[in-house]
């Protein structure tokens, strides 16, 4: 696929801080004959000054100004609550972003993953570069046109704020090229829509364990046709740095095609503690399988499925610190914790956390006993796994979250802990927003009333507007940077809030 310029779409990718309102086109001022409406009403200059600049007593004018201020508060735009009127659109506030870009692909993408690169950690300079993998959603008769895309987004510049001083602009230009960002992609043909894709990097570049070579980047793709494909995308990532590279046909073929699932699924995760590659997959029949890469480079799936969910497995994640433990979330309203060594293939812990589908889940990589979940009713919550007890009854146990928020009015479609801050969470919702939260923030009731924002939790840091958000991920090597996919493509942004 050829290079294409990525543009900022201010109409479809917008963010609102608490208290902002939508932009409304106003009619031009009408020009007419000037008329002195106060003519002959006052006899002297002293009378005019006493009445005020608009000819009214001060008390009357102050009362009207206070009423106008209250009316403005009533019009505060709150995502998920306030509805845009016909003709109204949302526009981003440049002062709230360090970076904001929108990038498009030939087809919408339900899922993506950010690939760790060799450009360094804690990167804060611009222009920025991000590598990622995704799969397309070409529907109907075009289903055979689906592709696995390996992406390189470069030239991602800092936000050009109109209120910056000349000295600030000059200092930014020392390490920043304000040219247009570029999206490059390499395509691997697929025969079905990608429901979920995840990347994994081995510590060495060969199956024989020769770790002197660069890391090998693998992708696992769950397709709508119930197959799971494993690809080595290392040569595609390397080809971005060598223009004109032609890869052999073998590079486009999967390393393995897994066919153990009889129904499609959306749950997929690589173990962070098994370097060669260990994969969990869950399907709409409620079955979970483990596939392991052998020392010789082959892939072996344990035919004994983990069973226990009464409905589809929506999300699955390995423990970040225990190599044999994983958790699963389901549309049956439960989260279950499992041990892969269990001969019974039954959950060790079974907890009901919602009366609706539990769509997504994120296990904190900083505080290992914290688990965040998002549900179909728009609620998301944080759970302390130390309070969950081993399963001893047929029915799931009940538990209370350590924090719960019902700000969103549509299903939560994605959730992810900040990679280095265990109090910050990113949440994507079908209400067309990505919200950022800081659980460490507290606000008493009096302060909340004074802010006139009782419906907005004090922990809400930021709201980014994006149509039909499907997935959100942090770029762990670029502090505060996020990437999201929706119906209109990808958004890449960094706020000044995080």
Image (tube, rainbow, N blue to C red):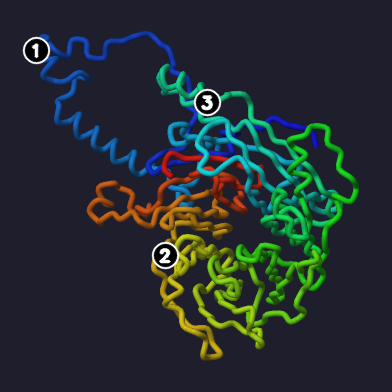
Farthest residue, direction right? 249
Q: Position of residue 277 (x, y in %)?
A: 70, 64
Which residue is located at x 48 percent, y 52 percent?
80
Circle nearer the N terminus (1, 3): 1
* In the foreground, 145 or 468: 145
- State the CA–CA distance, disc 3 to disc 2: 42 Å
**Residue 46 x %, y %:** 9, 12
Which residue has dot 1 on it?
A: 46
Could you say whether the residue bearing mark 3 is in a helix, strand or loop?
Answer: loop
Identify residue for label 3.
175
Residue 309 visible in the snapshot: yes
Residue 11 picture location, percent across and down: 57, 35
Dot 1 alpha-carbon crowd within 10 angstroms: few under 14, some 14 to 19, many 20 or more: few
Label 2 neighbourhood size at 10 Å, few (<14), some (14-19), many (20+)?
some
Q: Of the residues under marks 1 and 2, which one precedes in the sequence? A: 1
Q: Earlier in the sequence, mark 3 or mark 2?
A: 3
| Image quadrant in which the C terminus is located | top left
Residue denoted by label 2: 404
Q: Looking at the picture, how far across and down is residue 187, in whole percent? A: 80, 45
Circle on res. 329: none
Judge by depth and name the residue closer to the eye, 414 or 410: 414
Identify the element where label 1 is drawn: helix
Q: Position of 361 compared to 208: left or right?
A: left
Tell me how far mark 1 sits from mark 2, CA to CA. Answer: 61 Å
């Amino acid at each position: 696929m050829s290079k294409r310029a990525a543009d900022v779409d201010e109409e479809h990718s917008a963010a609102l801080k608490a208290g902002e309102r939508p932009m409304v086109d106003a009619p031009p001022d009408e020009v007419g004959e000037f008329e002195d409406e106060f003519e002959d009403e006052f006899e002297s200059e002293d009378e005019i000054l006493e009445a005020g600049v608009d000819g009214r007593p001060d008390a009357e004018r102050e009362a009207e100004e206070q009423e106008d201020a209250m009316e403005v508060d009533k019009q505060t735009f709150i995502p998920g609550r306030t509805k845009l009127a016909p003709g109204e659109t949302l526009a981003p506030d440049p002062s709230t972003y360090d970076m904001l870009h929108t990038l498009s692909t030939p087809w919408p993408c339900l899922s993506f993953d950010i690939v760790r690169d060799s450009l360094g950690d804690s990167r804060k300079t611009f222009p920025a570069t991000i590598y990622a993998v995704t799969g397309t959603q070409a529907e109907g008769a075009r289903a055979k046109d689906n592709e696995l895309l390996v992406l390189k987004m470069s030239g991602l510049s800092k936000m050009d704020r109109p209120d910056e001083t000349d000295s600030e602009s000059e200092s930014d230009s020392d390490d920043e090229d304000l040219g247009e960002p570029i999206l490059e992609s390499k395509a691997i043909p697929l025969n079905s829509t990608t429901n979920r894709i995840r990347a994994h990097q081995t510590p060495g570049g060969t199956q024989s364990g020769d770790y002197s070579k660069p890391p090998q980047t693998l992708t696992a793709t769950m397709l709508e046709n119930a197959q799971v494909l494993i690809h080595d995308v290392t040569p595609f990532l390397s080809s971005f740095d060598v223009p004109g590279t032609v890869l052999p046909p073998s590079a486009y073929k999967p390393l393995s095609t897994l066919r153990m699932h009889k129904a499609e699924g959306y749950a997929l995760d690589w173990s962070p503690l098994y370097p060669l590659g260990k994969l969990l997959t869950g399907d709409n029949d409620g079955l979970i399988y483990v596939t392991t890469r052998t020392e010789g480079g082959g892939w072996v799936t344990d035919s004994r499925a983990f069973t226990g969910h009464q409905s589809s497995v929506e999300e699955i994640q390995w423990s970040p610190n225990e190599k044999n433990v994983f958790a699963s979330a389901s549309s049956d309203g439960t989260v279950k914790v499992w041990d892969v060594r269990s001969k019974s293939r039954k959950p060790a812990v079974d907890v009901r956390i919602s009366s609706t589908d539990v769509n997504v889940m994120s296990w904190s990589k900083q505080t290992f006993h914290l688990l965040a979940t998002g549900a179909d009713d728009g609620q998301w919550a944080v759970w302390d796994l130390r309070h969950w007890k081993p399963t001893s009854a047929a029915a799931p146990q009940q538990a209370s979250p350590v924090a719960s928020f019902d700000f969103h009015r549509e299903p939560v479609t994605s959730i992810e802990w900040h990679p280095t801050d265990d109090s910050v969470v990113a949440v994507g919702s079908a209400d067309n927003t990505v919200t950022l939260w800081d659980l460490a923030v507290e606000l008493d009731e009096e302060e909340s009333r004074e802010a006139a924002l009782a419906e907005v939790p004090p922990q809400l840091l930021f709201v980014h507007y994006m149509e039909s958000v499907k997935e959100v991920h942090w770029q762990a090597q670029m502090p505060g940077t996020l990437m999201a996919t929706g119906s209109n493509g990808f958004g890449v942004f960094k706020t000044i809030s995080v």
